[in-house]
Every structure is written in C-alpha cells, then in structure tokens.
C-alpha cells in the first residue's frame, strides 16, 4: 500500500509504517500517481482527495486493462478529523472502492 498526501499527512503515514509520498499540488500528486501506477509495485494507492478528488480519472488511460492498483480517495487531515467516526468513514471508503467491508 502507498499513500499520496500533503507533506504533513505523508509524514504521519510514514510514522505509521506505510509508504507515503508527499505532494504539494494537484499536478505533483498526479505525477506521483502516474509513476506509482506505471511501476506496478502497489496493490492499493490511497490518494488525498484534497489533492486529487477523482484519482481514477487522473490516470484513466494508464489504468486501461489493469486491475491493480486499486485507487482509494481518502479525506485529508482536515476533513477526516471533522468527522467524529473516523474509523467508520475509512471503512465506508474502502467498502465503496473494493466492494466489501473489511475490519480495520
């Protein structure tokens, strides 16, 4: 799993043990996502929806004929912590993306 997020959130994901890439703009996030899709090293790439609201559309051409990686838009820190049920929010994002519920 890899995460593309703003620099502050990316550092937090790294501290949690995930591969995280920092982007400061939508253009930088798109370039990172394109590179990760082309490398094919990850089965799941979570993308801060504040940077790329629709990551699948950003790399639609590169994803043709590929099942992986699954692209998961996630809330940035600001949006996630405004929701009192952060775990439920993340579970719903995963369920919508991959089609079934998993226990986090």
Image: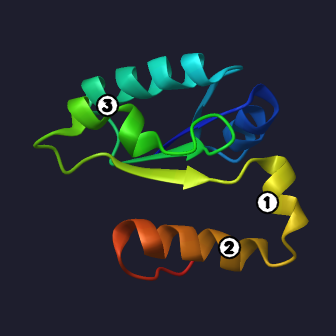
Residue beneath the point at 80% across and 78% down: 85
Q: Residues within 10 Å of mark 3 (few under 14, many from 20)?
A: many
Q: Residues within 10 Å of mark 2 (few under 14, many from 20)?
A: some
Q: Can you say whether 42 is above or below 72 in the image? A: above
Q: Is residue 33 left or right of residue 42?
A: right
Residue beneath the point at 38% across and 40% down: 57
Q: In terms of sequence position, does the residue under pointer 2 or pointer 3 come before the other? A: 3
Residue 71 in percent (x, y) is at: 41, 49
Coloring scheme of the render?
rainbow
51 or 6, which is in the foreground? 51
Residue 93 in percent (x, y) is at: 55, 68
Quadrant placement of the C terminus: bottom right
Mark 1: secondary structure: helix
Residue 16 in percent (x, y) is at: 70, 48
Q: Which residue is mark 3?
A: 37
41 or 70, which is in the foreground? 70
In which image quadrant can residue 39 be found? Answer: top left
Q: Can you say whether 39 is above or below 18 in the image? A: above
Q: Can you say whether 46 is above or below 92 in the image? A: above
15 or 42, which is in the foreground? 42
Mark 3: secondary structure: helix
Q: Which residue is mark 2?
A: 89
Q: Is residue 50 left or right of residue 64?
A: right
Residue beneath the point at 38% across and 44% down: 56
Mark-to-mark CA distance, 2 and 1? 8 Å
Q: Which residue is mark 1?
A: 80
Mark-to-mark CA distance, 2 and 3? 25 Å
Q: In terms of sequence position, does the residue under pointer 2 or pointer 1 come before the other? A: 1
Residue 60 - label: none
Label 2 with label 1: CB-CB less than 8 Å: yes
């Amino acid at each position: 799993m890899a995460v593309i997020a703003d620099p502050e959130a990316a550092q937090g994901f790294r501290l949690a043990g995930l591969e995280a890439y920092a982007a400061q703009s939508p253009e930088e996030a798109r370039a990172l996502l394109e590179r990760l899709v082309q490398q094919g090293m990850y089965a799941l790439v979570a993308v801060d929806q504040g940077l790329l609201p629709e990551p699948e559309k950003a790399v639609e051409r590169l994803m043709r004929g590929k099942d992986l990686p699954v692209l998961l838009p996630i809330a940035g820190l600001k949006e996630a912590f405004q929701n009192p049920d952060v775990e439920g929010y993340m579970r719903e994002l995963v369920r919508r993306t991959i089609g079934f519920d998993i226990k986090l």
